[in-house]
Amino acid sequence: TIDKNSSFLPEGNPLPEADPYGRTIHFGIREHSMGAELNGITLHGNTRVYGGTFLVFSDYMRNAVRLSALMHLPVTFVWTHDSIGLGEDGPTHQPVEHLASLRAIPGLNVVRPADANETAIAWREILKRYTKEFGKGQPHGFALTRQGVPAYEPNEDTARGGYVLFEAEGGEAQVVLIATGSEVHVAVEAREQLQADGVPTRVVSMPCVEWFEQQDQGYRDSVLPPSLRARVAVEAGIGLTWHKYVGDAGRIVSLEHFGASADGKVLFREFGFTAENVAAKARESIAAAQR
């Protein structure tokens, strides 16, 4: 493709005549090859690259992703269809363990934004991070939803990995709801229910655990006060990431099994990713924190 040879492209999609370099490569169903080639282009220099596939197929490119982290390469992997919300494709295409597994790779930053505004701010932050200020480069993985989600006011603290999206009203927070990606709006709806019942509730959006961990202790404590033990984490995947954040009084709304073939909204309801269930878990956590 770089030599204006369209062998990687469908015949009906030739390279633009005005751009013989070829900025877009059609890799086909070759996730491992794509990851390796992104690494190679980055090692060659002077090019910021990204490549996309379904999150579940990050397994096919895992070795290339790991090498990207090992070599400190500023590659951006874009993984879409990031939960059971993708629906009828079924459990073979629905990621469950993948977020936790990718977060386990040292040096890889996994970003799961709640909406378009968080996505835009995170993109900008990724581009800024390969500078002298940050030292060596690091790869990033975007986990993006298929289904539509509400958009919230842009908040520059997205670049800090976690921030207070909605503060408690009517008094100090009795519980904090922590969520990522497409589950943030579920946490926001749960907050509305709890607030209506007189339970002041804070919502924290946590698009990137790695970025949040890089913040100073004062900032982290301002988002997740140590004295506030009632906590609920909400993410449509294995809950391994969240135990350290919710503590012994906390609760996790997660998916500890494979998905199913059904409409995404049905799966969210059947597997407990609803405002009602999150609110119920919040009440459980409040009770546990008071014991």
Image (tube, grey):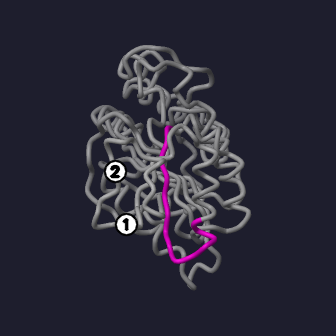
Q: Name the residue under label 1.
A: 20
- Seen as rendered, the residue at the extreme bottom is 132
Among numbered discs 2 and 1, the one appearing first in the sequence:
2
The answer to whether residue 72 is magenta is no
Rendering coords of residue 198 (x, y %) = 32, 36
Is residue 223 something that shows in the picture? yes
Point 27% across, 51% down: residue: 152
Point 59% across, 62% down: residue: 139
In the rendered view, tell whether residue 220 sits above or below residue 181.
below
In the rendered view, tell whether residue 248 sits above or below residue 226.
above
Q: From the viewer's side, name the closer residue of 143 and 278.
A: 143
Q: In which quarter of the image is residue 130?
A: bottom right
Q: Quadrant of residue 230?
A: top right
Q: What element carries label 1?
A: loop
Magenta residues, as a range?
41-54
Rendering coords of residue 286 (x, y %) = 52, 35
Q: Which quarter of the rendering shows the C terminus? A: top right
Rendering coords of residue 33 (x, y %) = 62, 48
Q: Mark 2 points at which residue?
A: 14
